[in-house]
Each structure stands twice: as C-alpha cells, then as structure tokens.
Image: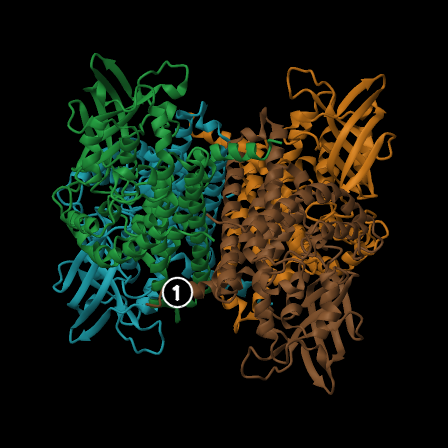
Chain colours: A green, B brown, C orange, D cyan
Amino acid sequence: MYTFSPASIDYQARLSAFMDQHIYPNEHRYEEQLATASNRFGALPIMDELKVLSREAGLWNLFIPPSLAQFGDTEGLSNFDYAPLAEIMGRVLWCPEAFNCNAPDTGNMEVFMKYGTEAQQEQWLRPLLAGEIRSSYAMTEPQVASSDATNVELRIERDGDEYVLNGRKWFITGAMYERTQIFIVMGKSDPDNSNRHLQQSQILVPKGTPGLKILRPLSTLGYDDAPLGHAELVFENVRVPAENILLGEGRGFEIAQGRLGPGRMHHCMRLIGATQRCLELACKRVKERSTFGKELSQHQSVREDLANSFAELEMMRMLVLKACHRMDEVGAPAARDMIAAAKVKVPIMAQTIIDRCMQVHGAGGLTADYCMAEAFNYARWCRQADGPDQVHLMALGKQVINAYTQD
Amino acid sequence: MYTFSPASIDYQARLSAFMDQHIYPNEHRYEEQLATASNRFGALPIMDELKVLSREAGLWNLFIPPSLAQFGDTEGLSNFDYAPLAEIMGRVLWCPEAFNCNAPDTGNMEVFMKYGTEAQQEQWLRPLLAGEIRSSYAMTEPQVASSDATNVELRIERDGDEYVLNGRKWFITGAMYERTQIFIVMGKSDPDNSNRHLQQSQILVPKGTPGLKILRPLSTLGYDDAPLGHAELVFENVRVPAENILLGEGRGFEIAQGRLGPGRMHHCMRLIGATQRCLELACKRVKERSTFGKELSQHQSVREDLANSFAELEMMRMLVLKACHRMDEVGAPAARDMIAAAKVKVPIMAQTIIDRCMQVHGAGGLTADYCMAEAFNYARWCRQADGPDQVHLMALGKQVINAYTQD
Amino acid sequence: MYTFSPASIDYQARLSAFMDQHIYPNEHRYEEQLATASNRFGALPIMDELKVLSREAGLWNLFIPPSLAQFGDTEGLSNFDYAPLAEIMGRVLWCPEAFNCNAPDTGNMEVFMKYGTEAQQEQWLRPLLAGEIRSSYAMTEPQVASSDATNVELRIERDGDEYVLNGRKWFITGAMYERTQIFIVMGKSDPDNSNRHLQQSQILVPKGTPGLKILRPLSTLGYDDAPLGHAELVFENVRVPAENILLGEGRGFEIAQGRLGPGRMHHCMRLIGATQRCLELACKRVKERSTFGKELSQHQSVREDLANSFAELEMMRMLVLKACHRMDEVGAPAARDMIAAAKVKVPIMAQTIIDRCMQVHGAGGLTADYCMAEAFNYARWCRQADGPDQVHLMALGKQVINAYTQD
Amino acid sequence: MYTFSPASIDYQARLSAFMDQHIYPNEHRYEEQLATASNRFGALPIMDELKVLSREAGLWNLFIPPSLAQFGDTEGLSNFDYAPLAEIMGRVLWCPEAFNCNAPDTGNMEVFMKYGTEAQQEQWLRPLLAGEIRSSYAMTEPQVASSDATNVELRIERDGDEYVLNGRKWFITGAMYERTQIFIVMGKSDPDNSNRHLQQSQILVPKGTPGLKILRPLSTLGYDDAPLGHAELVFENVRVPAENILLGEGRGFEIAQGRLGPGRMHHCMRLIGATQRCLELACKRVKERSTFGKELSQHQSVREDLANSFAELEMMRMLVLKACHRMDEVGAPAARDMIAAAKVKVPIMAQTIIDRCMQVHGAGGLTADYCMAEAFNYARWCRQADGPDQVHLMALGKQVINAYTQD
C-alpha cells in the first residue's frame, strides 16, 4: 500500500539495531546521571557518548529533507521516509538528541538552512548540525493567546545599527539547557502595519546578551523535562546587531508558517513511538500479573483495551503518514488540512492509550519506574504545543466546511 | 503514499459519474416506489432499470477479485482497488444492488466460485452473476451466540440420498426478498466430532423447499431494510439432495472462515461512503442555517465536530485500505488482525460521526428526509453483523498480546 | 437523604403494582393491536380499557402540581414527588397515556389551567382531564431553528373578530392521532415589536379548521411513534375567533417559558425509567447467554458496562431529582441551570446506556422483540426535543461562567 | 431535597471563612516553604501555624463520626454531614492536614478508635488526634495485585513474645514524612488457612524499628506529594512485641474491610472540591482571555465544556452524598454498591473535567502556576488508590447483575 524508500527501510533497520544496542541498555544510566546531576539542566556525559556512536553509525541528522541535503551528509529523507525513523526514536523520550533530531533544534536548523545568511549559518548552523550547541525558539508569551501568532507582543525596535527587544516569553524549550547558545525570537517590529501578517520579525539573540533573563523553569504535570526544560524569559532592552534579523523585517510570520508542518509531524511520530512502546509494555505486563485467579490477559476488558489501542495506533500512524506524504507532494500550506487532522488526533488518542497502559500496571504505572507516565505528559503537552487543539480544529473545521460547499 | 491501479482509478471516475447521472437523481423515485409497493419485499422497477444501465456502463460485478476473474467480464480488482468503489456505492445505501455488488450476494457468489461444483455454479452462480436471482446466507441463530460459529445448532443429518435440516435461523438478510431463490445454510452435521471445527457443514436450500418457513421480517432500530429485509426462518425436516452439500461434510467452518475477510471490508467501505456523505450534508447544512444571530458554521463547537469527523473519516479509510492491502498480500487469515481492527473501529466511529451530522440538522436530521438516520442504523447494525464488536476485540486483543510477548 | 412525601411513596407502590398487573402483561396485546390497526394513528381498544382501570385505581392525572390541585382529584404532587412516578410510567413507553400523564397533553393541560379562560377550560381542559380528547402543541417550524423561539415565523394576524394563521409547523406530536382535537399554536402576531419577546402569541386551533392541513407523519430513526405520531402541518389562511388567543396578544413567549420546566423533567424521568428497564433486561440476558464457554455475566467487560450503567443511572436520577426539587422551591426560571443540566445530560447518557444494553443482546437487541431499540430512539429524540443539546449547553455555559465570575 | 444537619451547615460556613482567611492567602507561602525546604519530607512551619489556628476555630478532627464522638471534642458528624466539609478542604490539596483530616491519618485514627487497645490508643491515637505525629497504612505490595487483599504476601510470624515481619510494601503514603511515627502493616500470619479471609493480620510497627527500611519515594505523573510522599518499604526480620497485633491474629481482612468505606468517600469529596475549584478558575480564565477577536467565554465549545463540567460535578456530588447517606443508614458493607459506584465514577470524571479546565488555560494550565495539574494528578492517582477502577467495577457489576436477577 505505502512503500518507504530503500534508504528509509535501511535506516529503520539500522536505527532499531542502534536502539537495541545503545539506547535501551542505557536508559537506566541516563536517568541516574540526570537524577544525580549537580545541575538538572547541565549536559549529561552519556548523551555525549551516544552522539559519537550515532554519528559513527551514520544515524546523524536524518531529519534533513532532500531539498536541504547540501547541509547534511546524506541525500536527505522526505517527511514520509523520515516518519518511521522519528517513531523509532520516540520510543525513548530523551534519545532524539543523540541523533541530533530533537525539537526544537531540528526546526531551528531548518530555519537557518532556509532563511539564514551565510554568516549566520557559519556561526550557528554549523555547530548545531555538529551537535556542539543547542538552540531555542521563542514564540509563546504568557500574557496573550500566542496560538494566534498575530497576538505576539514582544517589541523589536530598530535603533541605529541595532534592534532593541522588550517583552516576555515562556514555554521556551531548551532555554534552560546549558548547551543552548542561540535563541530565535519572534516579536513585533511593525505593530501598526495594516497587514497583520507583516507586523512580525524573527531575530537572533545569543544567550548571555545583556537584558535577557532566564526567569525560571516551568513544569508540566510535574515534569521539568530536564535537561532541556521549558523556561520563562524576560527581555529588557536586549540589544542585538541589526544583521541578526532573519530574512528581513516583517517576515517573521512567513518564517513561522514555513517552520510548522514538519515539526508537528515529527512530534506526532515520536509520540506514536512512545505510545507504541507503552502498548508493548502493557502486553507484557498482562501476561505477568494475575488477579482474582486469572492472568490479566484473560480479562475481556483488558483485551478490549489493548485491541482498541492497537487499532487506534494503526490509525494514528496512517494519518500522520498520509499528512507527511501530502506535505512532501504539495508542500505544507496545501497539506494543512491533513497536518491539522494529525496534529489534533494523535496527542489526544495517545493520551488515552497511554492512560490505559498505565492503568494495567497498577499504581506502579504512574511512577518513574516505567516510561509511561512521562509519555503521558508528553502527549498531554502536545495538545498545547504549537497551539491548543481548539485552534487547529477551528481552522480545520472551516476548511472542511468550505471544501464541501464550494459547488 | 498509496496508489490505486489505473483500472481502479478509471472505475472510480466512471462510477462517480454514474452516481451523479443515475443514482442520486433517482433516490426520491426509489423511496416512492418502495413506500407505495404492494409488497415491501418485492422487486422495484427502478432497480431493474438501473441494473441495465450499470451493465451497459461496464460497472457490473466489480467486486470480483483477480483470482476469480474467469467468472466476470473484467480482469478483477484486488480488495485494495475495489475499496474506493465500495465507498462510492455506499453513499446510497440501496444502490450496491444496482451494480450487483450488494451483501450478502457478493459473499455468496464468492462461495459458489470457490467451493461450488460446476452444476451448482450453473444453477445458482450464473443467474446470481447476471443479477437475475438473489441469495441468502443463513448462519445466525436466535438461541445461541452465533458469533462463536461452533455454537451453531441447526442439525444437518444424512438420510439416504438426502440431508434433513432442523433448526432455526434469524437475521437472514435477503430472505424476505422475492428475488431470493437460494439459501446457503450453515449447520451441524457431526456435532460429536472432537474437533469443534469439523462439526459444521454448509448446504444449499432452494427457497420453497417444503419445511422451510419464513416466519417474519425483523427490524433494527425501526428499519426493516426492505426490500431485502432480515428474516427469521424455521427449518422443519427440510430435505435436500445430498449433492447440495458445499465442498463436503464437515467443511462448513472452513467455508465460513474463507468468506469473511472481504465481506467485512466491503461493509466498512460502504459505511465509510455513507458517513462521508453525511459529513458533506452537514457541511452544507451549517452554511444554510443560522441560530442566535450566527451561521451554524461560525460556532466553534460545530467546527470542532466537523473537523474531528473529517479526521476520523480519514483514519477509518486508511485503516480499511491497509487491511485490504494486507489481505491482498498475505490472505485473509494472516491479515486477520488488521481486518478485526477495521471491523471494530469503523462502525462505532461511523455511528458517532453520523450522530453528530444528524444533530446539526435539528429534529429533521432524525427523519427520512435525509439519508442520515438510515445510515446511523446501518452503522449500528454493523456492530453486530458478523459478530458483535466484543468478539472481534477479544480475538484481536489475544493476537496483540501474543505479538508483543513472543520474545 | 431525600425523602418523598408519604403520598408519593404510596403512589409509587400502587403504580408499580398496577404496572405489574395491567401494563406489562398487556405489552404484547398493545403491540399487536397497533400492528394490525387499520389506521396506525387510530385509538387502540386496549388503551381505553387501561384508562378505565387506572382511574378506578386512583392513578389518574398524577402530574397535577399542588398549585393547580383544584383541577384534579388529588392534592397534587410536587415535581419532586411526581418524578419517581414518571420514572415508573416511563418503563413502558406508550403507557403514560393510560394514566393521562403523557406528553404533550400534560403540558397543554397545564397551559389551559394557568392561562385558559373559563370557556376555554370548559371546552378543552375538561375533556382533556377526562382523557376523552387529546391535544397538540405546535411550536417547531421546519425552515428555522425553532430552539430560538424568537425565530418562529408562522403569522397570526388580526382580521376583525378573527385571527388568520399562515405558516408551517413540524414535529407536532399527537397531531396524527385521531383523538387529538385541539392545537395550541405558537406564532408571530407582532413581528416588528422591538422587544423580541413580545412578538409571539399562542392561539387555539381546533382540528378540522379549514386551511389546516396535516401533511404527513414524520419518523425518527425509523419510528413513527404511532398512534400519536409527529406530524408536519400547513396553515393556509386558517381562521379562528379572536377569543381563541391565549392570555392575550404578545404573550406567547411568556406562556412558552412557563411551560417548559416540568415537561422537560417529565421527559427525563420517563427516559430514566425506560433506561432502567433496559439495564434490568441486560442483567437478565447476561445470566442466560453463554459464549466461548463462559456466561456473559462472567466477562469483565460486560460487568464493567453494567456497573458503569448502574452508576450513571443513579447520577442521572439524582440530578433530575435535584432539578425538580429546586424547581419546586424557587420556580422553573430560577432553577433553569439545574433544569438545563438535567435536560442535556440525561438523554445522551441514556442513549449510551441503552446502546450497551442492546449490544449484550446481540443482533436481537436491535429488533422490536425488546423494548430497547425504541427506548434508544426516545433517548436520541430527546436530544432534539425542546431544542437541541447545544442550545441548552450554550445557555447553561453562560450561566455557569457568570456565576463564578461575579465577585 | 437533602438537608444537612444544622451543625454541618454551621461548620460549612465557618470552614469556608477559615479557608478565605487562612488557607488561600497562604498557598503561595506553603509552596515556597516546600520548594526551599532542605528536606522535602520535613514538616513545614506554615502547617504548624495553621493547625493552631484551626483548633482555635473549632475546626479540628471534624471527620470523627457520632459513633466515635468520645474521641473528639464534638458530637461527631455523619459521613453525609462531613461530606461537604471534605469538599471544601479538598479545594487546596495540602490543607486537610491543617484540620487533622488528611488521609491516611483519618482512616488510621479510626482503626485505633475501633480496634486499638487502651494502651495502643494512649501511645498512638492520642498524639494522632492532637496532630503531633502522623501515621501510615502499609497494605500495597509491588509484586502482587494488592487490590485483591488476599494476595498480600508480607509474612508476619510469631516468634515467642514477638512477631517477625518480612516483605515489601510500596505506595505507603506518609511514610516519607518526618512526622510519621507509626505504621499499621497488613500481612499474612496464617497463609495456609483454608479461609482466605482469615490469613491476614494487621500489626503496629513504629518507625525506626530495626529491619524496616524506607527505600525511596515514589512519584505519580511527576509528583512526589511531598512532604507526605509515597514510599517503598522493605521489612527484613522486623521484630515487634506480640501486643502490637491489632484486634488479634487473623483479623486483618476484617479491619481492612471496616476501614474502607468512609476513606473512599472522603477522597471523592476532596477530589470534587479540587475539581470544583478548577472549574471556577476556568470560568474566570475564559472571561480574561481573548483569541481570534473574541473572548474565550464567547466560544460555543468553551461554553459546552464548562456547562458539561458543571452538570457532571453536580452528578458526582449527588452520587457521593447518596453513598454517604446510605453508609450512615445501613453501614459500609450494605452500602458497598453505592460506595463502589462513587469510587469509580468520581475520579475518572474529575480527571476529564480538570483536563478541560487545564486546556482553556493554555500551556500555563499544565504548570505549577495553577492548582489544576496537581489536581489532575490527584484524580489520576485515585483511579488506583484503594484498588484500580476495574476491580471495583467487577465487584459492582456482579452485585448489579445479582440484584436484577434474583426474582
């Protein structure tokens, strides 16, 4: 029915083997290093070791699409061909970084590839592609509904050869991380422009720039997502050189639009991988535990839950694959209905499936002894990341109604 | 991502054109003929007219797979390639018969093609393929859970050159229909066989055989599904010649197994077509109706419902396509996990979507003024047809658990 | 916790005994008389017999509240005390008429009691209270969203000593019934009044008035609800005497508001009774049927479904009781949040529970062999009757938001 | 409809006033003290201050029922009359301890009151009632499904004047807390007894007893519930005097049964309080935030969510009140159907409502800036506490089926 390219199929096999050999056996070590780290947002030695191994294994920067292949070492993979790889990586939440394929760096690198000057690419993209530094994308603001990008309030004002930034951001993933060196910041450079989509600009702000304060880490459902973390930031008269503007003043909205399709599908596929692993754990669990004289696997309601979860996972996977394929064919803007459909369906369905998988594990299912609780948090968070479900449903609903009333 | 064969794509276009030209414009006439028929289970003139047209248009017997192409006029279509055609036909519940593609005749014809003797094929298959007669498949019994085929109690006993049948069946689709001439009856010929799957046989019983009584039509949610109908039957010392046995004594279970995969997927695809049409109607409706000063299409909850319905329909469609594709590749038995997944997910999701579409139509949505209420009944009925969801979930759950605990 | 009055408790016992003695044993006879009636909307002999018996048993007109007790033979029952009686009657969908407690006659009688002139009461209320004639309430119109009462378009124009009516109505319950003699019709007498709630009037139109055409019966999910039925009506220059106006010109909205609280709660309680009975049937069924070597009652998923249904029924019942109690204490307008809460929750939950109960009955659960399929239709219909759920949720949501943001 | 006693109504007013004056204004201080504590499981100064104030206000030990009033300073409150107080306290998750009404101490104190010797009461109950020490109840074990109490494996063996304990427990709430001094431990003293309900005993183990190791704190969904915490414990040849046995050898199951009814309803009521507060926050939020040119409160889907949440909260509350009332009337064992109904319905419904309330808060709704995420964790955890939902549904299903098939 659908056929992945030979390259994708080959990568799938090699990536799975790498997971078996290097990732799963190191999960405990990773958690230990994190739990005992003096700085929860510091770099972990195990991650650096794994990065060396994955580069050697040729599993580095697989997210790069064919159109940007000149930036990588491979011929590039379409969104469709990359999807199963993202799913495999998603089985261990922290491991995409080991392949230089973690959010938000992949999206940021794409921005640099597509919109950066040569100097910007040399300074930031090169070390990002090498995994030497990390980056953040600063879009969301606490005081407005940032899912409507035109609401963004952070001010970017020209002052001579510089831009001056004032405002507040939060949920800035990676901002806490000590490796993070550069922030791509969305703000308003021309708030009075009558075209609401030309008011925004995106600009580069190196960490450490005076006036940029990292206020605090934020948690979701009790998770701080260390070492990357989600931070709240304040910009107080932050000055950067004028050449730090990306693509040009007033083109921030355009960059934001171009960035979103692939990133959303990557999240979906990683989440599917995480959910798939939870389902596999649940299947093992129900064969090992008995209650009221019967193996859990013999209970009809347990079987129904696992059967439904299997079927739902297939549906989720197929929907994302279709969205990826369409995005490859016609571009993200024209595929926005399928992207939105996947974006809203996958997280809520994943949340439900993982909830069931936790439940068959008893109270232990809620603890850190299994990967399920953290995967649940990832699913729940995805229902807000890049805009709440409701916003995407509103847009999709409008498209659907139009599509069937045009004659 | 997935590619239908050029033949399938061509049929899709021609079938859609035929629907536009001959089916949709005749819906009202069909309903009128049925409503005013002296016999609710008699043949309708409009159907005979449409059958002539569809044969002329080369849209006849499209359900025949390549492996049985010698029985049709085409090269045959794989389940995957036939799926979109079944979806299109499903948009008008009564119209598959116009293409000789309605249940249970398609499944019965397949049984004759695969398991019938030449004499049986000459007598029954030929007129079935020509659409001259109709057939029923008598499996379900009122007094036992027939979803477990080994529960079937109707007795088939050898007596000299004849078999004698005693028992009771119900939900026998088509049995009320005046065109129906032949029943394929499942029963127990060897109830004491220690192998529970060798106890059953299937045997041909012509309508009118003495002792076979058609007791009454059954309705589901108020629908009698005329003119085909679902009947309750009694077999009292019904005698048929020994050669009426299909394939041989004790092979009834085997025939039942071989029959089920494609039929279930056809139901799913037709139901998806019916649901898709309901969604399109709902989209039109919300642009035409205003309440509390606002077009319905402007209400966020309406948009969310329609957006979710669109996304769910895509997921359902992809799941069935995957099941069909897999069935084509490895056969129905090896694809039984995907078939079960589609079988349980599509009807319940269709029921939910159609329910939403009815709701935006106000009280009128529940009436016969729209196709939605009857489509709702079809979805609800499919959750029981060929076994209740619970039975398929039980089997699928077991397969899923085994699949992930084998290492 | 809650205490019904001694009178209510006494009625509950007597009503249950009457059901056991006269209603349940006659269900089959009722269905037979209906199925074989020459006129599906004619009066059935069995109903007339039962009405005599229930009057003799003192179980007549129990819906009358204490404030209107002068119209009945009892001291009247509060909504709270009447609720369990409505639940008991709801166990057999057609039987409330046997106690003169069926919709829409109860609501209509209340309108006559509260707003009728002595002459109107003598002419219409007296025979209604005696069960000699039936009545309809004509509010909903096909071409507008009538859940917003200000949308009503039927014109009521003064012409000398008469009013002239022009317009169209549908879903007029009871209009098909041969016993129905009088229609209470809502329309616009002053469409240009700047106060949208003073544009409407309600007026009495006797059946048979020239210009009033009963177009056709409407069905919901395949049910025509005979013999009462739901009809579509056309008013073409229908003339009635000026004294037929109720309460006075421009007071139609006021009457509509006053009518709704109790009627909605009666529907809820009857539906709870119907659902309760389905649950009881399901419990019996699962003890009688085995599948895959096990009684259905032993399957964990069956137990979970029935346990959840039991709990949900308790919650539904308590919610309606609370709404009734509050309505008794502060009147329907001040209790509108609780009434709306019950109005939206009970039907959808009933629909879900009945769906489960049908499912454990196999295909038979969908047929007329059980009361479940028709109860399902009743639940589904209640989600539209007196306005779709969405309208009530919108109003309730606004009230809730206001309630918690007033400080 | 239902009437709380004058005492309960008076306490409700005083408790609400106390919350307004002392609890809500101190939430931030509490969190700060916890966040900056050198020991996450140490006692917090603010808690000690509040305890003094609540005693002075006469809001101490309100959980004590009338039958045990001799142990308190009041006449005792029935479960029904205490329920609204538990709801009010539940609005701030950590505050029940300030009223000496937190789990598991309330249940443990009840055990001491009902089953303790005078010496045990003097040593442990007196300081517990005074709030000087805290206690744990050690039931759940990691290696077995402890929801089936007969599965418990910890061994309690008599050795001369002592009992020797060997085994492992987890999810022992309060065990991490520095104030906790005494553990009530469930184990098997007679594993070969043919009566499975006589194999267990409960025994007192003071913290610090040699061989008792507190292994680690457990988290649920990222929350460690400090300072009480949930701990994993190991018992290695733990020796306690024979008089530490509660009630007598073999009576552990009996004690466990007697303990559960009220505790479960307290959890439900506190959770309802927490959920109610989330709903109120959501109502405020939707009036303060605009998106796409409209206040959130104007979106139909937002209103529907809040309306449904309001209605569901009413239903949950009524169900728990009914269960409490019934428990007061006939005792917990005879009220076990209603208790189970409330136990399974309230947490899952609370989880859903809180999820909606988080969602209207955007990404911030998932953080610790609001009480919602932690309330979500409480709801999710309650679906496992005292046994997973499935176990209670199984038992309830069986009771329901029996109840309706006894004639």
What residue do we see at 31% from left, 17% from top?
Answer: A189
> Hey, which quadrant is residue D243 in on the image?
bottom left
Please, which residue is most extreme toward the bottom here? Answer: B160
Q: Which residue is mark 1?
A: B403
- Residue C183 drawn above or below residue D172: above
Q: Is residue C143 left or right of residue A386?
A: right
Q: Is residue A333 left or right of residue C39?
A: left
Name the subunit of mark 1: B
Given residues A62 and A183, the one toward you in this image is A62
- Quarter in which the C terminus of chain C is drawn: top left
Q: Is residue D36 left or right of residue A305?
A: left
Q: Position of residue C85 (x, y in %)?
A: 65, 49
Kind of residue at disc 1:
Ala
Q: Secondary structure at mark 1?
A: helix
Q: Position of residue D291 (x, y in %)?
A: 42, 26
What residue do we see at 35% from left, 73% from top?
Answer: D196
Q: Residues within 10 Å of mark 1 (few under 14, many from 20)?
A: few
- Residue B406 drawn above or below residue D385: below
Q: Is residue C87 visible?
A: no
Q: Position of residue A252 (x, y in %)?
A: 33, 24
Given residues D160 and B327, the one toward you in this image is B327
- Residue B319 drawn above or below residue C178: below
- Residue C294 drawn above or below residue A106: below
> Hey, which quadrant is residue A310 in on the image?
bottom left
